[in-house]
Amino acid sequence: MIFLADSANIEELEKLFDYFPLEGVTTSPASIANEKRPISKLLPDIASLIGDKMLHVHLISNNAERMLDEAVKYREYMGESVNFYATIPVTKEGYRAIPLLKRKGIKVTATAVYTHLQAIAAARAGVNFVAPLISRFDNISSHGIEVIQNIVKSITDYKMPTKVLGTSFKTVDQVHRVTLTGCYAATVSYEILEKLISHPLTDMITKEAILEGKNFYDISF
């Protein structure tokens, strides 16, 4: 599995990219709004920070042709070197937009995926990623991990090139369980990324090792 940061906060991203093996960033209208900065200023800053890593940008147009215009403008605005993915919902207009975007050479991530069949339809339409929302499943008395497992299985069985990107995690355990499904990627918040690599026993054994060896490690460096 690969990990992406689900954040538009530059300070958080700088901290994470300093040490965490991330493969990109996902943004949403909510994460953009939280920064209280226009997207025209925020996207170039994120793109500059992450280099050739993936940058998934959620579009806000609700018409297929306008989605195409929006995605083309973002790609032009950030430059061709940015590894840009247009994130669009699996609505009727979203399905219409997928082939339009693909014909322009724009990579597509399908979001607002709540069912196995929505994911398969989006994959058949040609998206690069389908992005089921784990916690949203659980909030409507569905089983998010099971749905992702079924999506992964079908995409594998049908030999489709689309990859699964798990989103909307609320706990470390959800991330853990998704890694066991064969899901290709997970985009995770700053707080949960910090927690998932931590363990109190790791901290304890590290401190013990320093105390035990500090009087005997006498080579200067």
Image (tube, rainbow, N blue to C red):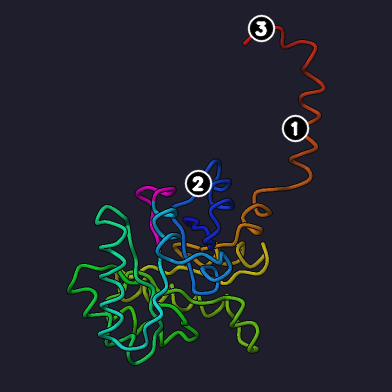
Seen at 22% across and 80% down, the residue is: 99
> Which region shows up in magenta?
48-55
Label 3 vs 2, first from the N-terminus = 2
Neighbours of disc 1 within 10 Å: few (<14), some (14-19), many (20+): few
- Does 101 sit above or below residue 84? below
Label 1 vs 2, first from the N-terminus = 2
Residue 204 located within the stretch drawn in magenta: no
Left or right: residue 192 versus residue 159 is right
Percent x, y for residue 148? 50, 75
- Does 138 sit above or below residue 184? below
Left or right: residue 28 versus residue 67 is right
- Does 188 sit above or below residue 152? above
The image quarter containing residue 117 is bottom left
Percent x, y for residue 65? 25, 85
Q: Which residue is mark 1?
A: 206
- Does 175 sit above or below residue 110? above
Residue in front for this viewpoint, 90 or 119: 90
Q: Quadrant of the C terminus?
A: top right
Left or right: residue 215 versus residue 11 is right
Local secondary structure at mark 3: loop
Q: Amino acid at mark 2?
A: Pro
Q: Which residue is mark 2?
A: 21
Seen at 81% across and 21% down, the residue is: 212
Neighbours of disc 3 within 10 Å: few (<14), some (14-19), many (20+): few
Label 1 vs 3, first from the N-terminus = 1
* Alpha-carbon span between mark 1 and mark 2: 21 Å
Local secondary structure at mark 1: helix
Q: Amino acid at mark 3?
A: Ile
Q: Which residue is mark 3?
A: 219
